[in-house]
Structure formats: C-alpha cells, structure tokens
Image (spheres, helix red, strand yellow):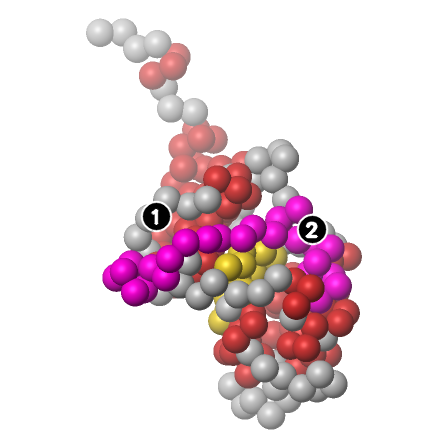
Amino acid sequence: MPFSSDDIPNPRQSVFRERREDAINSYLQRTPTIYRGSIHIHPASDDWSRRREDAPASLFLTGAIGVGKTHTAWQASRQWLATTVDRTGNMPSIETWRSTALFDALRPDNRDYDAKALTRILQNADLLYVDDLAAARVSPTGWTQERLYEIFDERYINRRPVLITCDVFPNQISHIVGDRVASRLSEMCRDGVLLLEGDDRRVSGVAA
C-alpha cells in the first residue's frame, strides 16, 4: 500500500516530540509525587500553560488553603514546558522553590547555597515558580528581601515569567517580600491573578 506524504513524519516535529517527552519526564522526576497526577485545571491556567496569544506572561494563583493552587501550578508548569519545547525545540529552564526553602537558601549564613550565585540562577531561569509565597516570613529590611528584589527586578525588566501560588493577593504581601517586590509582582501579574475557589481538597482526600 503506497504512503502519502502525510504518513511520513516531519523530522523537525519528531525531534521536538522526543525533546518534549524527555523534558516532561525529567520534570516529573522533580515533581513531588502527590502532584504528578493530572487534574482538571482552571481554563485561565490552561491558557497560560499553553502560552496562548491573549494569556498573561506570568500567573499568580491565589485562594484559600487547600483549593488546589499547588497542584494546578505543577500541572500548568509541565504544560508550559511542553508548549515551549513544541514551539522552539529548546529545553527551557524552570526553577521551582517553596518560599520557605527559597528564603532560607538566600540567607548569607546558609552554607548549602551561595546566595549570590543562586540569585543569578533565579534571575535568568526561563520560568521561576515559587510556591506558597505568604508562608515565609522575613525581616522587612533583611538581606533576603534585598536578594528577592534583585531576582524579581531582573525578571521584571527582562520580561521573564513567574508562576506564584499564595493564599493572599499580590498587594497583600509587602510585609513579607517588601514594597518593591510586591509592586513588581503586581505589575508582572496584572492580568494573571487568578482566584481559585472551592472546598479544601485535603479534607476530602484530594491533594492540593
């Protein structure tokens, strides 16, 4: 039976498909086990993850504890990764941090991390995902806030996207990250603040 040209795989598409699968599998290994399963996510999160033309560059997921912010973020970031590989063929770098671990890593007395080197990595990653931003507590005038400013200001001026989960809105986190960071996050996520609503999924036995 003869084959049509449509039956012959496009070499470029085949390469991109292999890269996407490799990227997703690698990212899944970094994903906490409880968040590896697929869930139905809000359409706005899906639009962001597929980098649709009218979707915002950055996404700020907020809502009550347990509504699914973190699970949504992990799934959306995986799809963002897949979409980016499909479009460019490149493997984008994604930095994923819980806020408490990030703030601790940025402390000058932390012997496990070089705060300045880590700052540069977080400034330049293709996507920075910070989970549960309001869970961390730092001094309003501390070293950590200075590093946070350097990170988010660099991402702001170079239009590099961020993905944030938080149980309050961007204009309510100044006491945690400082006024300058809160201002930049509000601008970066101006059209991408998404309020997730619903019951506590942990209480019902569904991780969120």
Q: Is residue 40 above or below residue 114?
A: above
Q: Which residue is mark 1?
A: 39
User: Looking at this rendering, what residue extends furthest in the left direction?
Assistant: 1
Q: Which residue is mark 2?
A: 190
* Amino acid at dot 2: Arg
Tell me which corner region of the image, top left, top right, bottom left or bottom right, holds residue 106.
bottom right
Disc ID at residue 135: none
Q: Is residue 156 above or below residue 99?
A: above
The tally of labels here is: 2
User: Looking at this rendering, what residue extends furthest in the top direction?
Assistant: 2
Tell me which corner region of the image, top left, top right, bottom left or bottom right, holds residue 154.
bottom right
- Range shown magenta: 182-208
Q: How far from the left and from the top, in percent, is residue 90? A: 53, 45
Q: How far from the left and from the top, in percent, is residue 27? A: 41, 56
Q: How far from the left and from the top, in percent, is residue 58? A: 62, 51
Q: Is residue 134 above or below residue 160?
A: below
Helix or strand or loop: what does disc 2 sit on?
loop
Q: Is residue 160 left or right of residue 196?
A: right
| Residue at the image position 66 percent from the left and 68 percent from the top | 172
Residue 205 falls within the magenta-colored stretch: yes
| Residue at the image position 73 percent from the left and 55 percent from the top | 187
| Residue at the image position 64 percent from the left and 89 percent from the top | 108
